Amino acid sequence: MGKKVSDTCEVIKTRPENYDVTSIIFEKPEDWRVVDWKPGQYGIIRVYRDGQWSEPHPFTLSCSPTEENLRMTIKQQGNFTSTIPELKSGDKIKFSGPYGKFCQDIEEHDDIVMIAGGVGITPFLSVLRHFLSTGASNRVTLFWANKTLDDVFAEEELKTMTAELNLDIIHVLSREKEENIPEDGVSGSIRYTTGHISRELLDEYIRVSSSAVYLCGPPGMQEHVLNELQACGVKPESVQRETFSFPKT
């Protein structure tokens, strides 16, 4: 008989990203045989607690494929996800993956528009971290919709990326007070605005003839954005979407 492949690995650490989002960094399984995986894919984890393994739960890998360890960035929105911050170094998890095709060929596009809602930023963080590690020259515009500034995370990392990549970031904050909005970033590469993602805002950045558009966020947000994109001349069927990652687990 051949050797049984093990999917068990250890947590290295957890890191709070904001008040309800936590990153879990963990080793690759000892017998993991994946040679090549793409930024934006997801994996499935089980956590060992109280003498038994949990049900499986899917989350995007937020790390670059070039990193030594794996990382998931998880929002607390249910019984399972609320226990993620309790994980400690050395705790056991089971991991399988990666799966999915979202962003699979994103590096082939010279002009990329990413539109994220909340924790829907995670596949795009994976892509941007990969672009940074590989010295990519793709032109990238990231729209990131959140309720308030407190919901934003990885802000300094993204700021650093704008200096290294051909990257513009537009933070769209639906419930933030106007007086709290920061000034735009260096050279206009980082912008903050209140309200919702609108056709007027999208139209400033999207080049209909050349932009490859990617969308990840809650269903209601996606529906709204698709309508606004259509008003800009972008065909909804041309938008690549990720929809799996929003169960309240």
Image (cartoon, rainbow, N blue to C red):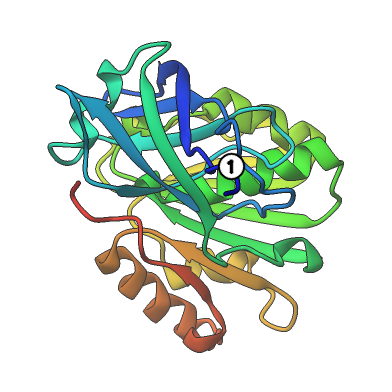
Classify mark 1: helix, strand or loop. loop
- In the image, residue 97 above or below residue 52: below
Measuring from the top left, give residue 130's x and y in whole percent.
72, 43
- In the image, residue 103 above or below residue 228: above
Measuring from the top left, give residue 145's x and y in whole percent.
39, 50
Given residues 88 and 175, the one toward you in this image is 88
Q: What is the residue that sits farthest to the top in this orientation? A: 89
Residue annotated with mark 1: 3
Q: What is the residue that sits farthest to the front in this orientation? A: 1
Given residues 219 and 113, the one toward you in this image is 219
Can see residue 32?
Answer: yes
- Residue type, mark 1 in image: Lys
Can see residue 189?
Answer: no
Residue ID at (67%, 44%) = 128
Measuring from the top left, give residue 102's x and y in whole percent.
55, 65
Residue ID at (19%, 41%) = 77
Q: Quadrant of residue 47?
A: top left
Question: Going by the image, does 113 lie left or right of 229?
Answer: right
Question: Going by the image, does 194 lie left or right of 170?
Answer: left
